[in-house]
Amino acid sequence: MEDNSATKIEEEDKSSENPEGGESHAEADSHWDLDILGEGQVGRGTMMRTAMGGIALLWGGMTLYPIYSYLKPKASDKDEQTKVTSLEVCKVDELPKGSGRNFRFGSTPALVIHTPDGEIHAFKAICTHLGCTVQYRNDKDAIWCACHGGQYDSHTGKNVAGPPPKPLAPLKAEVVNGKIVVSQA
């Protein structure tokens, strides 16, 4: 009887094999026949390691690309700033004494001032503290930053009050044929 039971077990083992005489279904499921490089079958562990490595590489790229984009200066920003070298702002009559006017000098905000004593000055209107846009206040005869109360001298652009650490960047202002022309200093 023992021979009959041993024979039945062998027959069951043979019936679980592929009809073509290859591996059993359990063994066939643990390998994929990805013979792309001619290296034979690829195991489940190798396939999972490769997939996880690919996912990690993709995740790393998605994480580092925004950081790279932020740190790399754009070429178009430099080109826009250097394109404008001179700009006609307005007629002298349109800017009375003791007033100022904000305008765009290329992609940079700028400010032209016609002081009470008749002088004309121009500056880049970017506060040196945190980069806010400044404007002229005729009641104080000063350039004022609304963000943190910084003040600059309207004649020189020098910081005179508040948190700004440096003076404003100057621009060249002159009157040509009755018009105020501002150019790079």
Image: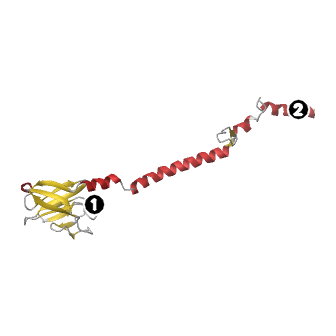
- What type is the residue that disc 2 sits on? Thr
The local secondary structure at tag 1 comes to loop
What percent of the width, then of the height, locates residue 54?
Answer: 56, 47
Q: Are marks 2 and 1 in contact (CB under 8 Å)?
A: no
What percent of the width, then of the height, locates residue 82?
Answer: 27, 56
Callout 2 environment at 10 Å: few (<14), some (14 to 19), or many (20+)?
Answer: few
The residue positioned 81% from the left and 34% from the top of the image is 13
Among the 4 quarters of the image, the one containing residue 146: bottom left
Front: mark 2 or 1: 1
Q: Which residue is mark 2?
A: 7
Callout 1 environment at 10 Å: few (<14), some (14 to 19), or many (20+)?
Answer: few
- What type is the residue that disc 1 sits on? Gly
| Mark found first going from the N terminus, 2 or 1 | 2
Viewer-side residue, 11 vs 124: 124
What percent of the width, then of the height, locates residue 69?
Answer: 41, 53
Can residue 137 be seen in the rendering of this structure?
no
Quadrant where the C terminus is found in the figure:
bottom left
